[in-house]
Image (spheres, rainbow, N blue to C red):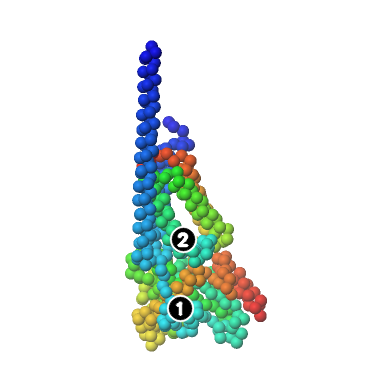
Amino acid sequence: MAKDNTGAKDARNAAAAARAEAKATEQARDRKVRIIGGLVVLVVMGGLLAIPLIAGKNKGPDTNASAAVPTGVTKDTYGVKIGSAWSAPNADKIPLLQIWEDFQCPACAQLEVNSGEAINKLVDDGAVRLELRPTIFLDDKLSGQNMAAGNPDSSKVTTMAFGCAVDAGKGKDFHRTVFANQPKTEGDGFSIGLLTQVAQSTGITGTALTTFNECLASKKYEGWVNNSYDRFSKEGVTSTPSGILNGKELTGEELFTPETLTKLVLAAGKSSK
Amino acid sequence: MKRILGNPLVGTLFRVILAFVFLYAGGVKLIEDHGARDAIMAYRLIPPSFAPVLGYVLPLVEIGLGLLLLVGLFVKEAGLASAIIMFLFIIGIASVWIRGYSIDCGCFGGGGDISPEGRSARYAIEIVRDAVFTLMGFWLYRWPSTLIALEK
């Protein structure tokens, strides 16, 4: 009996030892798998980190100070100045409204529908210095769709055309008409033919149209467009449309509600007098 | 039939779902040129100068987490990290919502819905979605033992 008992105890001890050993082996294996696996994941992440560095991505355009700018554009902002208020004797007392837009951005076209008329009235009344500041960040996001539609880099091309229209003295009309003709599907982009039509509809005809077409075909303002886009990144503007009144960013609600926008601009004009 | 809470089968499902969510989100951010940077700047929570750095790091962290979850390594740690990241996303969305910024206006290549109602609905859906992902992450932190995993 006693002997049998000892035997059973030994067997139990042996089994427990085997289990402990198995557990230790498993833990050792787990540790090995964790170390190797962790290293593999780190290497993969390192490899991915190198991709954008090698490809030079996320760099954005640099400012090229020698690039040509459209009529009236100055190199401090690269924005297009609209309205008679800019040449008023007390110009620096008149509120400055800067609007960042991408011609392919649907919300920007919507801004024209909502507040375009109110902004135009303020401009015509000489109550605001309007500065249109183009950006082309959607070219990156829509590159596939733009390519498929046969209109690559459509924001850039359209902004170059805008610059050519500014030279013809039709910047404001071109800006409005382009947005009114924005394709229904975001990403389809503007064809050269459509841009020429828009130019014609704003009254750019005859020799002026020839100049416009040459200006667009020669990419005269590509450098200017890149410079303006560079400012977009550097000034930390984050989305389009963005409205900045005397240096203070407006909320979407303020920008898209014409009555509120008008009131804010007029109030800014009063307080600075 | 085992109880639901802590069931390894459910944990495995959560692990794989989170893995693909992170791999997809990180992959998209990595491929888009300025995508992650612009998206991060759109939240206006961190200084603009810091956005490019985070734009690099965030997709990498997401892909790293995705890989770990996919193969089933460091499940407990990865689960906690997932829950924290998802919770930070919720804070980001909520703060943008409260501050009334319109960050979905063509900025993510998607819609152009700028009506306040459409925006609120969209933010609400995104917050609920990320809340579900946060819970999945906590589940894996609490019950890291799952099936078809490299570690036992």
As drawn, is B39 to the left or to the right of A257? left
- SS under mark 2: helix
Measuring 44% from the left and 47% from the top, which residue is drawn there? B78
Instruction: Give residue A177's position: percent from left, percent from top.
Output: 46, 75
Residue A5 visible somewhere in the drawing: yes
- Toward the viewer: B120 or A248? A248
Instruction: Name above or below for residue B139 compared with residue B37.
Output: above
The type of residue carrying mark 1 is Phe
The disc label shown at residue A174, or none:
1
Q: Which residue is mark 2?
A: B54
Distance (Cα) linking label 2 and label 1: 38 Å
Instruction: Name above or below for residue A77 compared with residue B28.
Output: below
The type of residue carrying mark 2 is Leu
Instruction: Give residue B81's position: percent from left, percent from top.
Output: 47, 49
Q: Are marks 2 and 1 on the same chain?
A: no
Q: Chain of mark 2?
A: B
Measuring 44% from the left and 57% from the top, which residue is drawn there? B58
Quarter residue B60 falls in: bottom left
Instruction: Name above or below for residue B118 compared with residue A244.
Output: above
Measuring 38% from the left and 53% from the top, which residue is drawn there? A42
- Toward the viewer: B100 or A248? A248
Measuring 37% from the left and 21% from the top, which residue is drawn there? A10
Residue B148 visible somewhere in the drawing: no
Instruction: Give residue B22's position: percent from left, percent from top.
Output: 42, 52
